[in-house]
Image: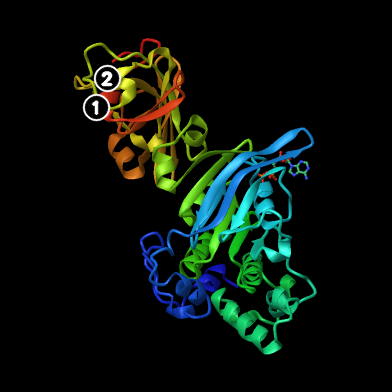
Amino acid sequence: MSELRDLDLGARPAQGHPRLASRPSLSYHRGTWLAPRREAAAGTGDEEKAVAIEVRGLSKKYGAFQAVDGVSFEVQAGQLVALLGPSGSGKSTILRTIAGLETADSGSVMLTGEDATALPVQQRGVGFVFQHYALFRHMTVRDNIGFGLKIRKVPKDEIRRRVDELLDLIQLGGYANRYPSQLSGGQRQRVALARALAPRPKVLLLDEPFGALDAKVRDELRTWLRRLHDEVHVTSLFVTHDQREAFEVSDQIVVLADGKVQQIGPPQALYERPANPFVAGFLGAINVLPLRSLKAGSIGRGPETWLDQPPADHAEAYVRPHDLDVFAERDGKPYWPARVERITPLGSVVRLDLRIAPDHPLHIELPRNRSLGVGFAPGDEVYVSPRHLNVYDRAQNSFQPVDVHRAMGLALQEGAGI
Ligand code: ADP
Ligand code: MG
């Protein structure tokens, strides 16, 4: 059974690129999914702005260990937000606290405007999907999906209708009578999602839902989840430790480390303008190069505040591997000299490991075509120029994106002068 075929969106209306689709047509499920909220918001223009999840000052200790430390963030109604951080950063604790499965030591949780801090799980209106398949093994797909409705004593024919709708939504129409053991991992997670959606939760909480699946199926399910969310628009908080996953699925990312929020913003904004060294490094490979003070007279006064206060020995340049160009000749330009140590083809890109004098490694990624044209070999002396970089000023603990022409007026430490 091909996962890919299973994931084909077939009869769905075309959506275009998920991020570009403004408010996708909801005709496919109109009236079933969103009518109540859309009606409530009709004409007010508040629909986009309503806050569905509001976490304020959440803290939680396990014994003496501070697992969550003063965490605050909001999720707008209808958004899909990723809670991204390394293992142990407190993601699951936060999610479980929002669900009511865990009690925080302090702080509050508001769900669609109501204080839910003291509400029991059953009254919070949250749907939950975990990493490990929590399907009931002895129940068919149909009974799994309908379970939450059955315990709420929803009439049988209504359950049947709702389950059929959801089977359609997760593209498992023909699988109603199968048991979980007769499904692939990806299919099981789709059933888990349908089961969570069945009682029409106010918010959907997903804790590494694709974590146990292999890379290709994960990839497909991400795309599928994003498209499903564009149709269903249920407010969703998605926990992951995988930055690529967070980038692919979410409208906003909350980056966590050591139980604290590091930065909140749209994926690309975090990537291009990280708030601190942790975020810069966690969101993708990055080179960190120490800088020495500005070269006298080489730079005019610019709008960046740090340029008015040269960072002296406390500054570092943060440059992404794909934000660097390599040249064989200096041509009198202020490039950084480097030596090629290793060239590794990685499919669509080629990775160059360079050493920038005397002893800082520098990693560059060039599109495969460009690197073929350049034809470098290990041992070559080359010249490097960043197109974009961020300067981190240790003394002020601040990051500043820098215009490249100004940046090249900076000199690397330890004599790698320009
Ligand atoms: P994440 O989901 O980001 O991996 P968790 O929220 O699961 O992080 O855990 C955060 C920290 O709290 C971890 O160091 C973890 O070991 C600890 N922790 C989580 N749950 C418990 C528990 N029930 N008892 C003791 N420590 C816990
Ligand atoms: Mg976790």
Label 2 is placed on what type of residue? Answer: Gly
As rendered, which of 405 and 120 lies closer to the eye? 120
Label 1 is placed on what type of residue? Answer: His
**Residue 181, image quadrant:** bottom right
- Identify the residue shown where x is 70% and y is 86%: 155
**Residue 199, image quadrant:** bottom right
**Distance CA(mark 1)–CA(mark 2):** 7 Å
**Residue 356, image quadrant:** top left
Compared to residue 41, the image places residue 301 above or below, namely above
Label 1 element class? helix
Identify the residue position indicated by label 2 in the image: 409
Identify the residue position indicated by label 1 in the image: 405
Residue 253, position as x, y percentages in the image: 50, 48
Q: Is residue 394 left or right of residue 295?
A: right
Compared to residue 270, the image places residue 229 above or below, namely below
Residue 202, position as x, y percentages in the image: 59, 66
Residue 355, position as x, y percentages in the image: 42, 22
Pointer 1 and pointer 2: residues touching (CB < 8 Å)? yes
